[in-house]
Image (tube, rainbow, N blue to C red):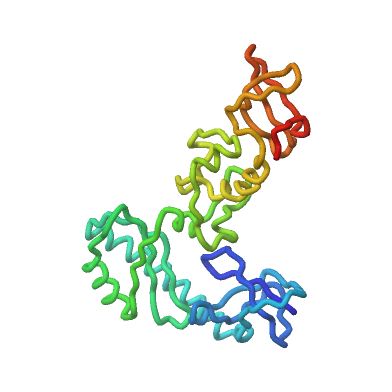
Amino acid sequence: MKVIGVRFRGDNRLYKFKSNSEKIKRGDYVIVDVEKKECIGQVVELMEITDSISLPPIKRKATKEDMARDIKNMELEKTAFEFCKERILAHKLDMKLIRVECLFDKSKLIFYYTAEGRVDFRELLKDLVKRFRMRIELRQVGVRNETQMVGGIGPCGRELCCTLFLDNFAPVSVKMAKEQYISLNPEKISGLCGRLMCCLAYEFPVYQRFKEGFPASGETIKIGDLEGKIIRYSLPRHSLFIETKEGQEIELPLEKIQGKK
């Protein structure tokens, strides 16, 4: 089955669609349905898959009229963003505007913002409706969603996971960092959003399975003449480290541990 990967303006995540009989090339713009609304996006990837999976089809290749409409929508988004920022200041609202999205059919303007608590934006909403004469939605999002929309480069040197492929934000805890023996320095384990990095959850289950059946960190073990307290495990090296009574740190391969079930 031929599959195309599409990206939409303001969203770097890749969305997959089933290709129809049209000759679609990388770089083309296509019209698709996303969440029951018509959207325009750019083809950034072409692939062939053998798995039988259910994917929505593309509706058609974008026309010159579609492209012109999208450019006008972009201009409207910029105008709406500046106007909304101005009115937020005028009404002295404690909220931060992130971005504005104009639906492709121009049926609605969505204003994304963050705020510490509930915001009474009734007067702001009146200003927006009066100025743009269309449906207006003010949608509050969290700091993770803000970072996802704005984008950036993570400490790993790559583009942020949430910007590229994460659809949902899974719960992340300090325990995940502890289990992987990562420094608990907040600067080391926090993302650009100020929350714990999503990637802490990626290898957490692997570390849990890796240590199954072995003594827990902090336990004292004895192997031959060596006796010491387990201070950490190393998954890449398939070993563990113990600290002897003399304060010496020694690495041991897991094959030497008799406690494995």
Asked which quadrant contains residue 107, the reply is bottom left
Coordinates of residue 98 in the picture (x, y in percent):
41, 59
Coordinates of residue 176 in the picture (x, y in percent):
54, 43
Coordinates of residue 196 in the picture (x, y in percent):
49, 45
Asked which quadrant contains residue 182, the reply is top right
Asked which quadrant contains residue 248, the reply is top right
Observer-nearest of 193 and 256: 256
Locate residue 133 relative to residue 3 in the image: left or right. Answer: left
Observer-nearest of 55 and 207: 207
Observer-nearest of 207 and 168: 207
Locate residue 258 relative to residue 79 in the image: left or right. Answer: right
Q: How many marks?
A: 0
**Quarter of the image with the N terminus in it:** bottom right
Q: Residue at x 77, y 75 (%)?
A: 50
Q: Residue at x 69, y 85 (%)?
A: 20
Coordinates of residue 10 in the picture (x, y in percent):
51, 65
Q: Residue at x 51, y 41 (%)?
A: 175
Observer-nearest of 176 and 95: 176
In the image, is residue 35 above or below residue 184?
below
In the image, is residue 80 above or below residue 244?
below
**Quarter of the image with the C terminus in it:** top right
